[in-house]
Image (spheres, helix red, strand yellow):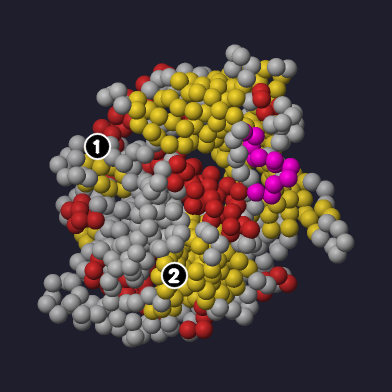
Amino acid sequence: MAGLCSKNRMRLCSVLLTVCVALSLVVAGSAVADSELPVVVPGYPLIPSGVRNPLTFEQIHNIIGPDPDGQGLMLDLGDTSYSGVIYTGPYPFEANESDYDYARYRLKSDLVDGVGTLPISPLFRDKYNANDWPAADMSLGYRLDLFRMGEDGIPTHLGFYDSVVSFLKQGDVFERNLTITEGPFVCLVRSDDPTSLAIAWETDQECTGYVYARYVYDPPRKRTATEWKLVAVSENTQRHEALVTGLQPSSDYEYYVLCSNEAGQKTESRVYAFRTAPGRTTPGFGKKIRFAFVSDSREGVGGGEQTYMGHNFAILSKIALDAHRRGADFFLFGGDLVNGYTTEPEDFRLQLRGWKQSLAGFWRTKPVYPAMGNHETLLNCYGDGSEDGICLDKWPYQTQSAEAIFAHEFYNPTNGPEASDPRRPTYKENVYHFRYGPVLLIAFNNNYWWTTNDKVQNYGGSPEGYMMGDQLEWVENVLNQAEKDRDIRYIILFAQEPVFPCGGHVKDAMWYNGNNNIRAATSYDGETVVPERQGMIEARNRFWEAIAKSSKVAAVLAGDEHEYHRLLVDKTTPVGVYPEDDTNNDGVLDTFSSNPEFDHPTWQITAGTGGAPYYSREETPWQPVYLSSQAGYCMFEADAKKISMTYYSITGQVVDYVENLMEVK
């Protein structure tokens, strides 16, 4: 299919894609033998569900050649049902001056019957030429504002789709050039190995990629840099992940990537900067570090950029820029990046790629570490006559599960646990840990291997919010080891579901209104679905007991609830204990005792405030210290003496502040 599409036959490809999607829905359940699955395959027909984007990444990039009128490049989406407007501008805008990549559009043209022109020529006029073209490498940012005609003759507004194309100017003719369509991103900056990191990017054609870097130091009177050196090579591919080694800890570098293909085309990124992580024995290890956290950027309400390809570009891009300006060294994200809940892999990929565009300016120079949320779901759904059907994590798990696609699209550490049943999806890159200076960061996943909550007991899988025994054991081991490590002063855990919800998800998260009957069904032997031994409340309390045993956990960060709240959990907090608080033996708590095993008071900080529709307070046994429904994010600062937290709204207001999260210990 990819080879066919690359020959500009997108109209035929669109038809074939529709057929392939239909066939995939029919055969998905049989791609893996039922006996090899740890779940029961429902005896109902497969149905499509939750598809946000009807077109693909490849369609958006199908540049078929020069515009016959010499105005730019022609785009063909391969489907006559699409119409709308194309906006263009130089990208990155004023690249020689700005330290943060962003798009700014200046021209527009019509898209009719799926075909239109990306206008370029007027951008060479003096009054529009903000990027000083012609230059060695020229790239055009473009935005598609798309409508699609339905079978009923009524058009549907699909929203915005942004991308970029590099081009050459040969006289009066514009030609498409080899293009970096995503990235470059700085990844895996960690004190675990402060002498290395990764640079990741994607191109529209197979090519060999080269990473060049130079060491930069700033003596008292002038900034000085060493010579450029080739530091990593990515062989002939479209998806590049290049490991750069031999770096100095706590040091500044500049870098760029260059790509060339067999056709003789070359493209080059602009020059960016990165700073390596502090090492255990380097002078910078005890100096202040900063990092940001937020969660829940799935589509908001209000249209426009608040509903961009499955997420809220308007809010998230503001947060990323503000975190950059305030000096964050890295960015943690707690899940619900996008709408998800889709049955189509290409739709899921496109949503995640749109999400990465919001953070691209930050990610060019500093790493982003995301966790999975309940909306990071890719599903097989079966029509049983109910409104939403029966949905399970898509298989084959190694390539089509939400966990597999998430690992493919991101660049996280691979040091997570092994699944106790090898037939299940991987934990790699959705459960992991890393160190940065004196802080250990742990990403956990309480949305792993999701099945429709009330169908788990019949078909297997896991409900929203639950953590299985293999992951709990891994968390316990990581915390125990960290307690003994003298170089780790603070621990931060982050994920999607709050352990103690306060508004918007009291009915689920890790609480379900105190219902301990909720649990995963982790094995299926061909005859019986076997539930996990511990129910939701038992698993939740086991998790927090491990946290409370540590003297170093500064906070547990979460999202899911689309507000900010800060809650202190200690031995006096009425959290509910099972079975003591189940007075009528039905598996549901009737009273809410405190837990004497919660040795060290610990903060839970929830910031599901990255752009999803807001929530407010609901009644719970525990009481948050502070709650706000303002969109915004948390900024943490840590050094050898303390770790503080500030919650900033998107208006720049300081909404909440804790000078030292460890004082409660």
Q: Going by the image, does 382 lie left or right of 648?
A: left
| Res. 133 image quadrant | top right
Decide if residue 484 is on the left or right side of residue 449: right
Instruction: Name the residue rendered at 20%, 56% in the picture.
Output: 454
Residue 475 horizontal/vertical position (percent): 42, 69
Q: Secondary structure at mark 1?
A: strand
Task: Identify whether 577 is placed above or below 223.
Answer: below
The stretch in magenta equals: 89-100
Residue 529 lies, with reference to residue 580, above or below; the image says above
Dot in front, 1 or 2: 2
Residue position marked by numbered label 1 in the rendering: 47
The circle on residue 23 is none
Residue 388 at x, y percent in the picture: 22, 45
Local SS, label 2: strand
Graded by Cα atoms within 10 Å as few (under 14), some (14 to 19) or many (20 or more), the crowding at tag 1 reads some
Figure quadrant of the N terminus: top left
Q: Is residue 449 above or below residue 513?
A: above
Nearest the viewer among 580 and 359 is 359
Residue type highlighted by circle 2 = Ile
Closest to the observer, 619 or 466 = 619
Separation (CA) of disc 1 from disc 2 = 38 Å
554 in the magenta segment: no
In the rendered image, is residue 415 in sight?
no
Residue positioned 28% across, 42% down in the render: 380
Could you tell me how many numbered marks the image carries? Answer: 2
Q: Residue lying furthest left in this view?
A: 584
Residue furthest front as drawn:
127
Kindly identify which residue carries mark 2: 605
